[in-house]
């Protein structure tokens, strides 16, 4: 083999190796956090209970310590959406309000970020009304529907009662 042939082969190998596009490693999606009942596992996101709001509405109360759960909404497996607000007096309390569902019904749900609809957490529960007191829960008047980012400023909400399982 001549020097010219050997040089040509080396150049072709180098060009082939350099021209191959390397793709970045695939980014691993983080699995949504599992939501538990606070009295079973008081993690940084847990369900305190359910409350009725008249004949047509319901509130779901979560204890949340993760600041990532600030501008979020809740969606059930059948597509019902709940608007969620954090308590100012008790910032670890997150209230989610939506249409009333039947007492005793199974409730598979997900918590999503308003900005990009990314699922942050999920859980399966059974609705049991009357588990929490809703006295002093936040006002949900004049808020955008679930799934739409709310404005940066919120009205001042009334004082919130302390809840069990702390």
Image (cartoon, grey):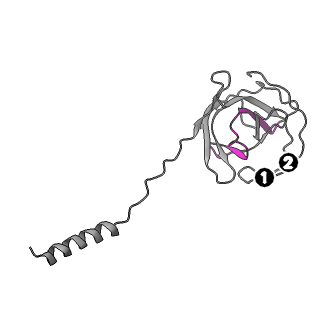
| Vertical position of residue 134 compared to residue 10: above or below | above
Point out the stretch of residues depicted in magenta: 55-80
Which quarter of the figure is the N terminus placed in?
A: bottom left
> Is 70 displayed left or right of 21 in the figure?
right
Give the x, y percent position of residue 152.
81, 52
Does 34 lie within the magenta span?
A: no
Label ID, residue 150: 1
Does 77 lie within the magenta span?
A: yes
What residue is at 62 percent from the left and 43 percent from the top? 120
**Mark 2 and mark 1: Cα distance apart in space:** 9 Å
Q: Judging from the image, what secondary structure is the residue with disc 1 in?
A: loop
Give the x, y percent position of residue 41.
63, 24
Kindly check if marks 2 and 1 are in contact, taking CB atoms under 8 A apart as contact: yes
User: How many neighbours does mark 2 have within 10 angstroms: few (below 14), some (14-19), or many (20 or more)?
Assistant: few
Q: Dot 2 corresponds to which residue? A: 154
Q: 80 or 152: which is nearer to us?
A: 152
Q: Judging from the image, what secondary structure is the residue with disc 2 in?
A: loop
> Is 15 displayed left or right of 118 in the figure?
left
The picture quadrant where one finds residue 124 is top right
Q: 133 or 113: which is nearer to us?
A: 113
Give the x, y percent position of residue 145.
76, 51
Q: 5 or 29: which is nearer to us?
A: 5
């Amino acid at each position: 083999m001549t020097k010219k042939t050997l040089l040509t082969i080396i150049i072709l190998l180098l060009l082939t190796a350099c021209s191959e596009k390397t793709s970045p490693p695939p980014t691993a999606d983080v699995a949504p956090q599992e939501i538990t009942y606070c009295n079973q596992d008081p993690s940084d996101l847990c369900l305190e209970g359910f409350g009725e709001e008249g004949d047509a509405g319901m509130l779901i109360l979560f204890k949340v310590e993760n600041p990532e759960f600030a501008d979020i909404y809740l969606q059930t497996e059948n597509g019902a959406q709940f608007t969620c607000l954090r308590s100012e007096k008790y910032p670890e309390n997150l209230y989610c309000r939506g249409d009333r569902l039947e007492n005793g019904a199974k409730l598979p749900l997900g918590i999503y970020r308003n900005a990009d609809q990314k699922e942050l957490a999920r859980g399966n529960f059974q609705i049991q009304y009357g588990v929490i007191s809703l006295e002093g829960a936040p006002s949900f008047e004049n808020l955008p529907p679930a799934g739409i980012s709310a404005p940066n400023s919120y009205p001042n909400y009334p004082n919130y009662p302390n809840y069990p399982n702390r």
